[in-house]
Image (cartoon, coloured by chain):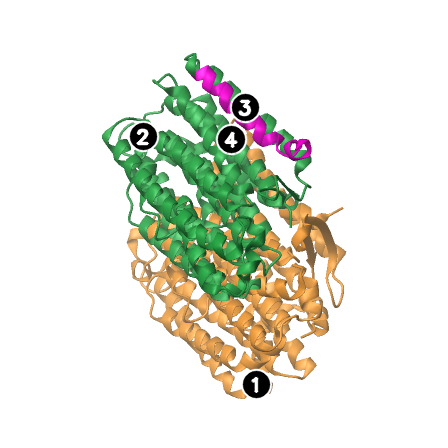
Amino acid sequence: MARDLSFLFPELLLASTVVLMLVAEMLRAPRLALAFGLIGLGLSTALTLPLLEADTSVFGGTYRVDLLSGWAKLILLPGTALALLMTRAEIAGKDREGSVYVLLCLVTLGALMLAGGGDMMLLVLGVVLTGLGSFAMVAWPRDDAATEAAMKYLVFGAVTGSVMIYGLTFWFGGAGSTLFSELGALQDKPLIALAGLVAVLIGLGYKAALVPFQFWAPDAYDGAPVSVAAFLSVITKVAAIFAFAQVLRDLPVATGWPVVVALIAAVTMTFGYLAALVQSNVVRLLAYSSVAQAGYFMLGIVALGTSPLALPSVIVFGAAYVAMNLGAFAVIMVAGRDLDDFKGFGRARPVIGVAMVVFLLSLTGIPPLFGFVGKVLLFGAAIEAGYLWLAVIGILNSVLALAVYLRIVVPMYQAREGEAVRAEVALPLLVVLGATALVTALMGLFAGVFPG
Amino acid sequence: MPLLSISVFLPLLGGLLLMALPNRSARIAHGVSIATTGLTFLVTLAIWARGTLPGGFAQVEEIAWIPAIGAAYRLGIDGLSLPLIVLTSLLFFLSAIYAARITDRPAVFVALMLMLETASIGTFAALDALLFYVFFEVSLVGMYFMIVGWGYEERQRAGLMFFIYTLLGSLPLLLAIIGLYLATGTFDMRLWIETPPLTGLAAMLALIAMLFTFAVKIPSFPVHTWLPAAHVQAPTVGSVILAGVMLKFGTYGLVRFALQMTPDAFARAGLVVLAFGVFSALYGAFVALAQSDLKKMIAYTSVNHMGYVVIGVSVAALTLDPDLRAVALNGATLQMVSHGIVTGALFFLVGMLQSRAHSREMADFGGLLGQVPWLGWAFILSAFASLGLPGLAHFPAEFQIFLATLNAQPWAIVAIIAIVVTAGLYLRAIAAVFLGERNEKWAAMPDLDRGEMLAIVPLLVLIIVIGVAPSWLLNMIDATMRALQF
């Protein structure tokens, strides 16, 4: 018991932080809640470092403390801290400000459950914990758009969640255990394996916004505050991808699941970028772009069990994605939600303009930016697993991606009619922009620190 | 001293320094630009002085980068890359001198140009495939912003076309690189060259991917359509760099990657590549003949000249005679250098003409030789070089290419018709612009000023030196090409 708990220090610390933040919010002290949150996230990150080499599981194999969950903490906890700062910049001084901070950290706790889960029950717990907090955050502005978006999100989440639980019972029946590590027993029960796989694809695919479970994403992102949209597009998505990795690496490849996932990946990438191509609202554009990015993640998932590059590729691209997507959303907070708001933005604000170009080119996968390193590893993993056609589709989609992101870059350097209004950029937002830009621009050069 | 790394990153440092300066006026920006590119040129001369090794790479510099996947920072040179590196640093130096007249956001322009120089030298010097790809793509981004930011009327469309075309073009190379990596577990290009890792179908697929990438960059028919648009809309300096340096990425890659890493597949596909080369050379010449826009015309002659390089490389792949191979590759490599110098000069001169007259239409001019003798004679000399007149830079290169072709694949010699066509089109252009009836509209046109002289005269001198006595350059190229294993 004590041994098990000692491996869970980061998670326990985060849970206690959430409680403290709740108390602070009850005292109507949002800044205190924010401070608690930032300190708690920082300390949890630090506590993760000594556990990074661990490769074990606790509580009877239900929760894994391994490479994937370790890096999940290193990526998601600082990512949440940045999201907190963005939220502060957006909603400072508004009513119920602190409750958003609490929910952010609570959802992140759920995200860690997803990324470390070694058991079906824990998977369900993670899905529910991330879901409940997210619904509330999307509904936070209390206007029509937000309410509608949250309703859609909630209904869709409830349905997919129930389907997932239902499907998981097949696996439980087939394998005789709720542990993922026992899934090998499904080796020669392809139908049962398939039933459970479909369930997991629905439940986690909804979280990761894979096609065809992506409908909620553009509405939810657009209805929510931009910072919450950024958080949802990054933290819950990466957590769902890591959960995919935890589940599927134990499922025998012979059941044919990689083909199903590969098809979904191909459709997701292509649909995401095609839909993004016609958006005029930048938040919706980035929503569809993050749908497509989820498809790229699946290139690594497909290769699980057949390529040693699979896990590193998902981890590296996860880190890159968190940095560049948060950064792009942070720039939207400065510039505005409409594509027209970006006209002349690069000339009016040269430094933030360059940062945006870096984020977008990294999302496209232009070297030597961080996103490129992740994509190379993803392509390598897929090719090594024998999915050359999928890598080719991914590469063709990179061109589509360029067209999508240039739709933002090109107007940025056109002349703007009328006087540009230069509002002051809040300090927390500047911190976020600086940190994400540095990571996106330079981490590609120091990719050696990641596992491989 | 790691001179190679210095030459690669010195420009970038200059650009960063400029961005950090509080005062970024045009004077200071161009001062930094000329000083940095000049210094870089001197460093590459020092690299030249250190020399190459026959067979294998010299002056190798290596630092770990992503050890987990065998990617490292590896630089090195041989007789193929060194001339191109020196050519690059020279053209950037001269471009920096010429660009000193740019007043629209000069600091940003200079920073972009310096970034482009880092990417260009890095592309030629990289010995790690991933690093090569990084530099290769960064150059794309730099050129895109240069066209979009400082180009002419249609710059947005041309820039977008250039970016999407070449990005789509370069991604297959990434696939090929990943394929080679998975076969060896390293990105070390030296290992891939020493023992080509792929065989059979895999090698052929990798070759096709590479050929696609480099054909776009070269550019070869039928994927050349981005070139005229990009060239015509790019600012003068952009055109010079695009034609003088960036097209060489394609031909350099054709030798370094396609020929050296998948030699057997290249030998099998050689006839097809040769046919594309021949057709490109002819097509480029005939389409250039049809142009009335000077810049477009020169852009299409690039398709023609690069076609000769493709011919040379594929002839080398098809023949087994080592002497003939060396002759063909020597010609191809020298052709890259000559084209950089000659076409660089031509784009400078057209740019100078355009900045005076705001027109590139041949029909708008006439009898300019008496009005602007320096500009006129410089153009005539460069044009004669470009059409392959003996004693000027293109002649020794094209002579060797055709010599090898005639011995190995006699039918391909039909490409020589293109030389006649180029001669015709240049004579027509000279007659239309510089000879004949004097157009009084341009009576006040000034001749070259000092800055323009400084930019153009070194190129003219080199055109004559390489034409008359190419051996100082050819000996080094030859030593490498004879030892080339494939």
Disc 2 crowd, CA 10 A, few/some/many (<14, 14-19, 20+): many
Counting residues from the start of the chain, the first of labels 3 and 2 encountered is 3
Disc 2: host chain: A
Disc 3: host chain: A
Disc 4 crowd, CA 10 A, few/some/many (<14, 14-19, 20+): some
Q: Secondary structure at mark 4?
A: helix
Disc 1: host chain: B
Q: Residue at x 48, y 20 (%)?
A: A21
Question: Vertical placement of A39 versus B332: above or below?
Answer: above
Between disc 1 and disc 4, the foreground one is 4
Residue identified by numbered label 3? A16
Q: Residue at x 47, y 18 (%)?
A: A33
Question: Vertical placement of B246 versus B260: above or below?
Answer: above
Residue B406 is marked as 1
Segment colored magenta:
A1-25
Real-space Cα separation, disc 1 to disc 2, in angstroms:
77 Å
Farthest left residue? Answer: A144
Real-space Cα separation, disc 2 to disc 4, in angstroms:
29 Å
Q: Secondary structure at mark 1?
A: helix
Same chain for marks 2 and 4? yes
Residue identified by numbered label 2? A139
Q: Amino acid at mark 2?
A: Ala
Q: Amino acid at mark 4?
A: Gly
Task: Pick the residue in front: A48 or B108.
Answer: A48
Q: Quadrant of residue B422?
A: bottom left
Same chain for marks 1 and 2? no
The x and y percentages for residue B214 are 51, 65
Residue identified by numbered label 4? A434
What shade does chain A have? green
